[in-house]
Image (cartoon, helix red, strand yellow):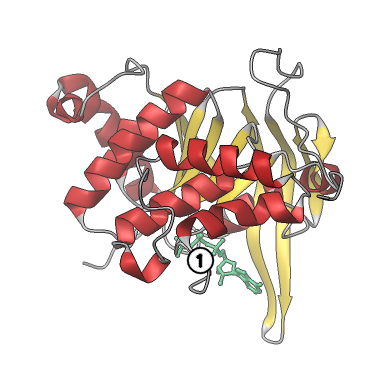
């Protein structure tokens, strides 16, 4: 017999109302790493509220603390000061209740497990029954357009397909929130365009709250409801830009004056905080 559920996700079932309040609230968060060469101030006085269903991108120069902020939300780093609430809980509670899925820059799939086996892994750890695992894996594969690839091994898939599998794994237990750390950074532009469109569709279909780290201005403008621009280290938020494009937007919007105006504002924000030698 299958074991009973060990950790059930904190998510509400499909059709039931989400818990009230913002999905994520970051209040005056600073984070300092103590290293052998002295302290490294990664984040300084970061304040941010992410409402449910938003798609928020983080953009800023290399080393400004984007990953650190995402990791702090995921309880993988502890702020030196300030407070973070996820679904109204502290980050440890939210982690234990599996409020979010995390997608890393590299797909990080286990090579000895099939794609279906990789997607099922969190469900196995959480004690889902075999029948429920199979149903969720099938749903996950459909969601990321990988139906028919469940029995393949990761090395039999392209980089873009591997990253889609890792997104399906992060969503397998149906968390409300998806934390994505530059998931498409290593992919070529054509594949990235395709994945951006697929991610947008997935977001539209599922209504998840997404926090997304990127270095790409067009990617941020195309995907987001809000773009958070950060300064060089210590990372501070210097601008939060609203993008009000329709949810079913197509890649062609990248040629519109509205799109270019937002992209320009992001570019100016990044330039203002950075001295480029080139
Ligand atoms: N565990 C750690 N110990 C010490 N310093 C760290 C640690 N993790 C990150 N840092 C430092 O904190 C700063 C912020 O790093 P972080 O990876 O969050 O930046 P980032 O904006 O995500 O960078 P990139 O865009 O290059 O991925 C950097 O200077 C980094 O070297």
- Looking at the image, can residue 60 be seen? no
Q: Percent position (x, y) of residue 219?
A: 31, 41
Task: Look at the picture and state if 266 lies above or below 185.
Answer: above
Q: Percent position (x, y) of residue 34?
A: 74, 75
- Looking at the image, can residue 248 be seen? yes
Residue at (73, 60) in percent of width and height:
77
Task: Choose between 76 and 165: the one closer to the eye.
Answer: 165
Residue at (21, 67) in percent of width and height:
278
What element does badge 1 sit on?
loop
Residue at (64, 44) in percent of width and height:
133
* 246 with respect to 259 (left or right): right
Task: Look at the picture and state if 200 lies above or below 90.
Answer: above
Few, some or many residues within 10 Å of mark 1 (<14, 14–19, 20+): some
Residue behind mark 1: 108
Q: Residue furthest front?
A: 1
* 106 with respect to 39 (left or right): left
Task: Look at the picture and state if 116 lies above or below 254.
Answer: below
Q: Percent position (x, y) of residue 265?
A: 31, 33
Residue at (37, 17) in percent of width and height:
244
* 145 with respect to 60 (left or right): left
Tally the marks: 1
Q: Percent position (x, y) of residue 202?
A: 42, 30
**Label 1 residue near ligand 1, CB within 8 Å:** no
Task: Choose between 92 and 84: the one closer to the eye.
Answer: 92
Task: Look at the picture and state if 194 lies above or below 160.
Answer: above
Ligand 1 is in which quadrant of the figure? bottom right
């Amino acid at each position: 017999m299958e074991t009973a559920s060990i950790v059930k996700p904190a998510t509400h079932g499909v059709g039931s109302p989400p818990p009230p309040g913002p999905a994520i609230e970051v209040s005056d968060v600073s984070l300092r790493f103590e290293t052998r060469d002295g302290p490294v101030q990664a984040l300084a006085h970061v304040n941010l509220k992410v409402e449910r269903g938003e798609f928020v991108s983080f953009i800023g120069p290399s080393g400004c603390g984007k990953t650190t902020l995402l990791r702090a939300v995921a309880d993988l780093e502890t702020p030196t000061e300030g407070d973070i609430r996820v679904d109204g809980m502290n980050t440890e509670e939210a982690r234990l209740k599996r409020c979010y899925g995390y997608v890393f820059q590299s797909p990080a799939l286990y090579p000895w497990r099939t794609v279906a086996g990789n997607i099922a892994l969190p469900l196995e750890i959480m004690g889902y029954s075999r029948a429920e695992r199979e149903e969720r894996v099938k749903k996950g594969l459909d969601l990321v357009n990988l139906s028919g690839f469940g029995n393949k091994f990761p090395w039999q898939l392209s980089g873009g397909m591997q990253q889609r599998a890792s997104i399906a794994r992060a969503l397998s237990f149906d968390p409300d929130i998806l934390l994505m750390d530059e998931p498409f950074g290593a992919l070529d532009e054509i594949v990235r365009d395709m994945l951006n469109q697929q991610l947008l569709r997935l977001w539209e279909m599922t209504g998840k709250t997404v926090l997304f780290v990127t270095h790409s201005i067009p990617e941020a403008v195309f995907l987001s409801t809000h773009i958070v621009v950060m300064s060089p280290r210590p990372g501070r938020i210097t601008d939060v830009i609203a993008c009000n494009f329709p949810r079913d937007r197509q890649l062609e919007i990248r040629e519109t004056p509205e799109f270019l105006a937002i992209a320009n504002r992001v570019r100016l924000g990044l330039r203002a905080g950075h001295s480029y030698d080139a």
